[in-house]
Amino acid sequence: MFCRNCGNPVEDVSVICTKCGVPKGQGSNFCPNCGVPTSPLAVVCVKCGVALGASASVPYGYQQKSRLAAGLFGIFIGGLGVHNFYLGNTSRGVIQLILTVCSCGIGSIWGFIEGILILCGQINTDANNIPLKE
């Protein structure tokens, strides 16, 4: 693995690059797979074809949310907005909870449908726009 900031080889067990001090997996000047210098506007590495950019990686220290967990929360207890709270959409979760309580449970259909959409891949990011893990 190579430092994405300076291109220096970084051991798998390292937390930061010993040359530039950037946390492992951070930086944007080099391909994370092969270490070749890349343009800041590049979408893929011209040498190895790996995806580049902010959408290609998860921010350092961020835990990806599970698609299966979010979908099952939506299907079984979606009326309470649990899947939206899990994904970080707290405003939407509160609205679902209030709607379900005020409609005597009829509003839970919204959560059920969102659960299905999550499992089918139509909803595929959390509130921070980070892709859901499989």
Image (tube, rainbow, N blue to C red):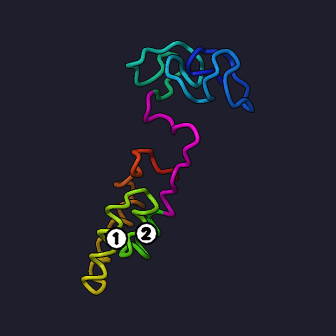
Magenta span has 68?
Answer: yes
Instruction: Please tell me whether mark 1 sits on a helix, a strand or a loop.
Output: helix
The spot of residue 57 in percent (x, y) is: 50, 35
Residue at the location (56% across, 37% down)? 60
Residue at the location (45% across, 46% down)? 131
Residue at the location (52% across, 12% down)? 37
Badge 1 crowding class, 10 Å Cα cut-off, few under 14, some 14 to 19, many 20 or more, is: many
Give the residue type that dot 2 points to. Answer: Val
Q: Which mark is nearer the camera, 2 or 1?
A: 2
Magenta span has 84?
Answer: no
53 shown above or below 113 = above
Badge 2 crowding class, 10 Å Cα cut-off, few under 14, some 14 to 19, many 20 or more, is: many
103 shown above or below 119 = below
Quadrant (top left, top right, bottom left, bottom right) of the N terminus: top right
The spot of residue 128 in percent (x, y) is: 41, 46
Q: Which residues are magenta?
A: 53-69
